[in-house]
Image (tube, helix red, strand yellow):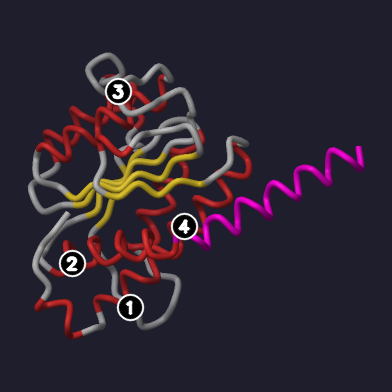
Amino acid sequence: MTLALGTYLQERDEAGLALADDAERIARACHAVALRFHLGGRLLSFGTGQSAADAAHLAVEFVHPVIVGKRALPAFSLANDASAMSGLARAGLFATQLRLLGRAGDIAVGITIDEDCDNEDCHGEDCDEVAAGLAVAREMGMTTVALTKAGGLGSAVVDHLLTARSRDPRVARELQMTTYHVLWELVHVFLNDPRLAATEVSR
C-alpha cells in the first residue's frame, strides 16, 4: 500500500513538473484564444464521459467569472444537452453540433482522457468523437485547442495540443483542470493588454 502510494505521488510530481515545462505552449494557446474573444469569437467546449464535466466546468469559468472584476465571455459546453447527446450519438456527436452552432472565428476546446488515439487513427470512442469535432472545427476556421493525456490525440487535428504527460486518467484530469484554469486566467491577462488589438490572427 505504502509503495503504491509513493509511486502514484511520484508520478503526479513528475507530470506536474512536465506541465511547467509546457508553459510556453500553454501561453501561446491562451494568447490565440484571447485574440479570438477580442475579435468576437465564442468558446465551444466538449468532451465525453468524465471529460464532459470538465468541458462544462471550463465554459462556466468564462461565462461566470469567480474573480471580481473579470468580465464574462461567451462560452458554452456542447456536452450539456442530454437530448442532443443521445440523439446525435450515431451522427457525429460534436461534429454535427459544431457544424450547426459554430462559426469561423470561434474557439473549439476538446477535452479527452482517452489514450487509444494517435495522429492518423482513433480507436477509443471518447477520443474519436473529440477528434472528429476538432477536425470539423478546424475546417470551419475555428481555433482548436485539445486537452489530452499522454498517448491521446495527435497534433494533426488541432492547432494547440496541451498534453498532460501521464497515462493515469486521474493524474491527467488533475493536470487538465490546472491547465484550463491557467487558460482562463491568462486569457483575461491578454485581453487586458492593449497590444492584443495589434496582433495578427493566427491559429
Could you tell which of marks 1 and 2 lies nearer the N-terminus?
2
Give the distance between the C-alpha atoms of the residues marked 2 and 3, in whole angstroms: 30 Å
Q: On the image, numbered disc 1 is attached to which residue? A: 189
Query: Quick check: 100 left or right of 69?
Result: left
Give the distance between the C-alpha atoms of the residues marked 3 and 4, in whole angstroms: 25 Å
Q: Position of residue 138 (x, y in %)?
A: 16, 40
Q: Main secondary structure of the magenta part?
A: helix
Picture mark count: 4
Could you tell which of marks 4 and 2 lies nearer the N-terminus?
2
Q: Position of residue 148 (x, y in %)?
A: 44, 40
Q: Residue at x 31, y 69 (%)?
A: 187
Q: Residue at x 35, y 44 (%)?
A: 146
Q: Residue at x 32, y 74 (%)?
A: 188
Q: Quadrant of the N terminus?
A: top right
**Amino acid at circle 3:** Glu
Element at label 3: loop
- Which numbered mark, 2 or 3, is in the foreground of this view? 3
Q: On the image, numbered disc 4 is attached to which residue? A: 179
Q: Is residue 114 magenta?
A: no
Query: Quick check: 42 left or right of 185?
Result: left
Does residue 39 sit above or below 124 in this rendering?
below
Q: Quadrant of the C terminus?
A: bottom left
Query: Neighbour class for label 4 at 10 Å: few (<14), some, many (≥20)?
Result: some
